[in-house]
Every structure is written in structure tokens, then in C-alpha cells.
Image: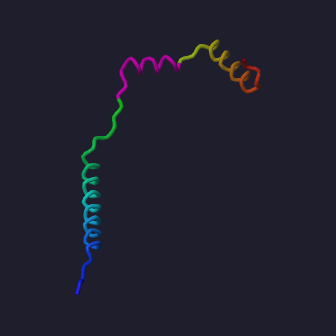
Amino acid sequence: MKINESGRVNGVNSYQRNIESRELQHIDKNKRKKDEVSISPEAMELSAQSKVQDPERAEKIQRLKEAVSNGTYE
């Protein structure tokens, strides 16, 4: 009498490999470093300067926005 077929044994082995790969992925996730961003002082200065706008530039930008929305910008 044959209890186990050869195909069933391989099915159990693939199930075990799946479990082992999940465990390895879980361990890898815990060891990974998190992403970090650092902004240089020069970039911080440029960012601060871009926030300061002169009134002429703001007016020009507003005119361009209106021209684009009206469809008259070329």
C-alpha cells in the first residue's frame, strides 16, 4: 500500500521554503536602514530667498497665470 505519492512530498517542501523565505524577508526588513534627507545650508538659504518675492515679479506671474487660463498665452 502506497501512502505518500511523490508529488505530495514536493508540495510540502515548497510550502516549507515559502515559510523560510517569508521569515528571511521579515528579518531583512528589520535590518534595513530608513531613508534620510539632509539639506545643506546653501539649499536652505536658496529656499528662504525664493520665498521672498518682489511685487513686480508677483504681478508678472499673476498676469501669466491669467493669460494661460484665458488661453491667450503664446
- Which x, y percent locates residue 52? 53, 17
- Furthest residue toward bottom: 1
Front residue (pair 56, 69): 69
User: What residue appears at the point 52 percent right and 21 percent down from the top-left corner?
Assistant: 51
User: What residue appears at the point 71 percent right and 18 percent down from the top-left corner?
Assistant: 63
- Which x, y percent locates residue 58? 63, 17
Front residue (pair 48, 25): 25
Above/below status of 37 relative to 64: below
Front residue (pair 21, 68): 21
Left or right, 74 with respect to 40, comes to right
Front residue (pair 58, 30): 30
What secondary structure characterizes most of the magenta part? helix
Kindly indicate the quadrant of the structure image that contains residue 33. top left
Kindly indicate the quadrant of the structure image that contains residue 5. bottom left
- Which x, y percent locates residue 59? 67, 16
- Which x, y percent locates residue 2? 23, 83
Quadrant for the N terminus, please: bottom left
Asked if residue 47 lies in the magenta stretch, the reply is: yes
Left or right, 24 with respect to 67, comes to left
User: What residue appears at the point 26 percent right and 61 percent down from the top-left corner?
Assistant: 17
Q: Residues in magenta?
A: 38-51
Left or right, 57 with respect to 3, comes to right
Above/below status of 74 relative to 17: above
Asked if residue 46 lies in the magenta stretch, the reply is: yes
Quadrant for the C terminus, please: top right
User: What residue appears at the point 29 percent right and 69 percent down from the top-left corner?
Assistant: 11
- Furthest residue toward left: 1
